[in-house]
Image (cartoon, rainbow, N blue to C red):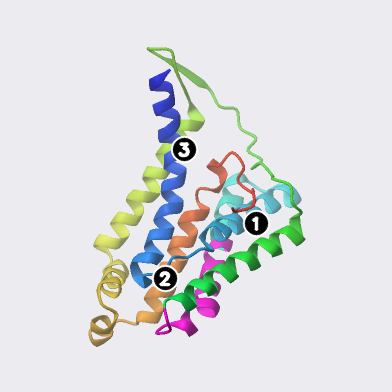
Amino acid sequence: MLLQQILNGLTAGSVYALIALGYTMIYGILGLINFAQGEIYMAGAFAAVLLLSAYKVNFFIAFLFGMGVAALVGVVLERLAFRPLRGAHPLVPLISAIGASILLQSLALLLFGPADRSFPIHFEFATLDLPGGVSLSTLQLAIFGSALFFMGLLMVFVKFTKFGKAIMATALDQDTARLMGINVDRMISLTFLIGSALSASACPRSPLACSRAA
């Protein structure tokens, strides 16, 4: 039983880790607690479910579409709610983030109603019986494997690409980054884009992918 619960915890943790990565990327570059990160995740989930339900498209197309919508919402949010408030008292962008969170929740409530919706995955998943009475489904393997893939992809991007190093420099010192010729505004927008897309990549793995964010 203990091993089974550890396995279940690792599976759930891989979902939360992707959302947390997006959250911490934004905090790392702006020092901002983005209370709207859960709503960005929600927007990507609703977009993917809407595409699957209305147009019956391929699951992977809907998955990428949801990530794209979340990335777009994140970039727009940064441009409208956070960029004009840089240099203001720390409480000001914090209140703006709370307002953005409430706005996105209210829009989702008006457009989709209050009911939770499960992500419609129409796949057959096998179950493997392991020693010790532990059961491992291919869905759990897919969740864990894809989470590792996105985490590894992010690590490679940050450590070995020009844009990734520019994001790290911006997070360390924005003024020095500007002196080095880095477009700080662009790097912050790119961070919001990547962080939002990473959060949305967890949508199909959540049991209630389209539930309203708390």
Which mark is first along the chain, 3 or 1?
A: 3
202 or 110, nearer to the observer: 110
123 or 47, nearer to the observer: 47
Q: Residue at x 51, y 63 (%)?
A: 35
Does 168 sit left or right of 46 as displayed? left
Q: Which mark is residue 132?
A: none
| Quadrant in which residue 9 is drawn | top left
Label 2 secondary element: helix
Residue under label 2? 190
Q: Give the magenta part as a residue range.
A: 69-89
- Verify CB contact (< 8 Å) between mark 2 and mark 1: no
Tell me if residue 188 is in the magenta stretch: no
141 or 38, nearer to the observer: 38
Which secondary structure dominates the residues rendered in magenta? helix
Which mark is first along the chain, 2 or 3?
A: 3
42 or 36, nearer to the observer: 36
Residue under label 3? 12
Label 1 secondary element: helix
Tell me if residue 80 is in the magenta stretch: yes
